[in-house]
Amino acid sequence: MGLFKSESIGVEIQGRELKCLVCGHDAFWKREAQLNTATATFFHFDWANRSGVCYVCAKCGYIHWFLPP
Ligand SMILES: [Zn+2]
């Protein structure tokens, strides 16, 4: 699709190694995600109109999405 870099990375969250919630894999593609205004408006989330980070499992494709506090 060309959306992701071909190189997967290990990820650490809060000092713990991230493992895929679905398949337990430990390599991910990282994507920055700008939550768009349409989505924010739809869900009435004022706080959602900002960027987050996605770690996409390199094995099964499950998206682990984090919003920085
Ligand atoms: Zn997975």
Image (cartoon, rainbow, N blue to C red):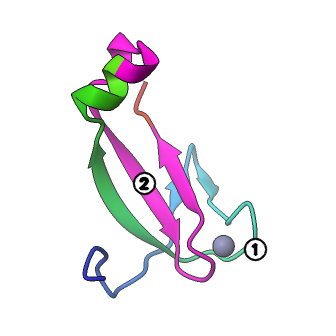
Disc 2 is placed on an element classified as strand
> Residue 22's x, y, as percent?
75, 66
The residue under the point 53% across, 80% down is 58
Name the residue tied to disc 2: 54
Q: Which residues are magenta?
A: 42-66
- Which residue is at the front of the view, 27 or 52? 52
Q: Quadrant of the N terminus?
A: bottom left
Q: Disc 1 on helix, strand or loop?
A: loop
Q: Residues within 10 Å of mark 2 (few under 14, many from 20)?
A: some
Q: How far apart in space, not on screen, are marks 1 and 2 (Cα)?
A: 17 Å
Residue 17, located in which quarter of the rendered image? bottom right
Q: Is residue 19 above or below residue 40?
A: below
At a point 28% along the width and 80% down the height, the residue shown is: 5
Q: Is residue 37 above or below residue 8?
A: above
Q: Can the viewer see residue 37?
A: yes
Q: Is 47 left, or right, of 65 in this rendering? A: left
- List x then y, in percent, for residue 14: 57, 43
| Relative depth, front residue between 37 and 10 | 37
On screen, residue 46 above or below 42: above
User: Which amino acid is tagged 1?
Assistant: Cys
Q: Amino acid at mark 2?
A: Cys
Mark sitting earlier along the chain (1/2) = 1
Ligand 1 sits in quadrant: bottom right
The residue carrying mark 1 is 23
Question: Does any atom of ligand 1 lie closer than 8 Å to the CB of label 1?
Answer: yes
Q: Residue 31: which numbered mark, if any?
A: none
